[in-house]
Image (spheres, rainbow, N blue to C red):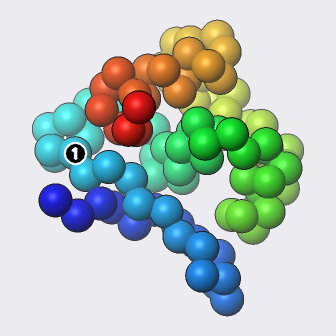
Amino acid sequence: MPGVFLGGVEGNSYCLLLKAVPPALAAAWPLSGRRTLIVRHLAYGKSPGEIGRLLGIARESVYEHLAESRRQLQVRTNFELVRLAVQRGFLEP
C-alpha cells in the first residue's frame, strides 16, 4: 500500500512518506500532517534544527509544533510522543 506524501523542500530531492494507514485510524490521530512529519523526523534522530532546515521553518517553530503535539496527545516527553505514534501505527518501529 503506498504511503502518504507529507512534505519536502522545493529544489531538494528530499521527501518523506508516512506509513499508509486506514482512514478510520487516520481520523483518530489528532496531529496534522506537518506535526506528524516532525515527529517522524524526531524518531529518526533529527534535531529540531535539522528538522527546521529540512522543512524550511525556524527551529523555534519545530519546538512549538512538538510542544503542541505533546499537549494534544497528553504526553510529557518527545520519547513518549514517538512511542505513541509507533503504538498507534503511524510510524514503523
Structural crowding at the residue carrying mark 1, measured as other residues with C-alpha within 10 Å and reported as few (<14), some (14–19) or many (≥20): some
Name the image quarter holding the C terminus: top left
Return the residue nearer the eye: 33 or 87: 87
Write the residue at 49% across / 63% down: 16
Task: Please report the residue visible at 58 percent of the width from the left and 36 percent of the height from the top.
Answer: 43
- Residue 71 vertical position relative to residue 63 in the rendered view, above or below: above
User: Does residue 35 appear in this view?
Assistant: no
> With 15 as the anchor, is 30 left or right in this view?
left
Residue 45 seen in this snapshot:
yes
In percent of width and height, residue 35 lies at 55, 44
Residue 10 place in picture, x, y as percent = 64, 84
Tell me the quarter of the picture where residue 44 sits.
top right
Q: Amino acid at mark 1?
A: Val
Identify the image quadrant of residue 54: bottom right
Which residue matches tag 1? 21
Left or right, residue 71 beside residue 2:
right
Measuring 16% from the left and 59% from the top, which residue is drawn there? 1
Against 18, is 80 above or below? Answer: above
Residue furthest front in the image: 93
Question: For numbered disc 1, what is the local secondary structure?
Answer: loop
Residue 92 lies left or right of residue 72; in this view the side is left
Q: Position of residue 67 (x, y in %)?
A: 69, 27
